[in-house]
Amino acid sequence: MGFKVIIPARYASSRLPGKPLREIAGKPLIQHVYERALASGAEEISIATDDWRIREVAEAFGAVVHMTSPAHETGTERIAEVVLSCAECDDTIIVNLQGDEPQMSPQLIDQVAGALEAHPDAQSATLCARIEDKAVLFDPNTVKVVLDNHGYALYFSRAPIPWARTDFDANARSLGLPLDTTFYRHIGIYAYRAGYLKRFSTLAPCILERTESLEQLRMLFHGGRIYVEEASEQPGHHVETAEDLQKVQNLFQTNALFK
């Protein structure tokens, strides 16, 4: 199975400006992400950005860089521009490895591409993991997903879904998770067919996407099907805030796997 990885990266992160160039264990964050992709089975890897500083650093460590419009609101939009400009074949599988995932398992990059290849009726594939901790379920920074009986996404939300009506009352946060319901958190890695990315570039953002600040809801809103597979292993920590950055720096210092 062949697939390509595109890593979207922007400098102007509202929560952590200059995030792709923040240093972790002597390397910029974006280089760690790139090296995760190199260790996967990808046949091509590139970085999509709108910032010359990211381009300069990425090219210095050997990456292919595509300069894209600064007007994009999401990483998927940025990747779609690259797919269009490079005239990718419609059947090519493109993995969106987000630029803030310095500990993403290469096996999961390969897994999400394989999940899409195995489901030709899906326009996209992504991964999830079971939630065992109630604090994670109620954390709005953790995206939850509900699936149908064939493993396709019904909805993604920052809210705790599904809502266990008989268990979650006014004291919901102090009770344990109900044993008869499985809760999943979304792992933010996607595979798309290039042909769908070309179509995605024509779709307007929807009210659900803007309300939840979740770009994958645009796909569902416009009738796209997203296959969701349970991750074969933990993805590691991503970086959104300064606290996340410090946590990942500490993990790199103590775990030889990421050095």
Image: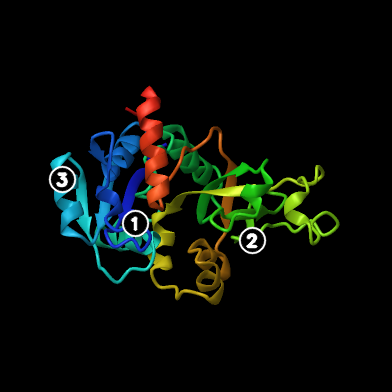
> How far across and down, in percent of the image, does residue 244 sit?
42, 46
> How far across and down, in percent of the image, does residue 207 sit?
54, 76
Circle 1 sits on which residue?
A: 16
Q: Amino acid at mark 3?
A: Glu
Question: Mark 2 Cα within 10 Å, few/some/many (few <14, many 20+)?
Answer: some
Circle 3 sits on which residue?
A: 59
Lateral position of residue 171 relative to residue 100, left or right: right
Nearer to us of marks 3 and 1 is 1
Q: Residue at x 75, y 50 (%)?
A: 174
Q: Residue at x 51, y 56 (%)?
A: 123
> How far across and down, in percent of the image, does residue 258 sit?
36, 29
Is disc 1 in contact with disc 2, using a CB cutoff of under 8 Å?
A: no
On the rendered image, what quadrant is the N terminus found in?
top left
Q: Amino acid at mark 2?
A: Ala
Q: Please report whichever mark, 3 or 1, sits nearer to the chain's N-terminal start.
A: 1
Q: Nearer the viewer, residue 54 or 5?
A: 54
Instruction: Report the disc number at residue 216.
Output: none
Q: Quadrant of residue 158?
A: bottom right
Q: Nearer the viewer, residue 127 or 18?
A: 18
Nearer to us of marks 1 and 2 is 1
Circle 2 sits on which residue?
A: 159
Question: Mark 1 Cα within 10 Å, few/some/many (few <14, many 20+)?
Answer: some
Q: Nearer the viewer, residue 1 or 214?
A: 214
Q: Quadrant of residue 23?
A: top left
As measured in the structure, the alpha-carbon distance from the residue carrying label 3 to the one carrying label 2 is: 40 Å
Q: Amino acid at mark 1?
A: Leu
**Which secondary structure lies at badge 3?**
helix
**Which secondary structure lies at badge 2?**
loop
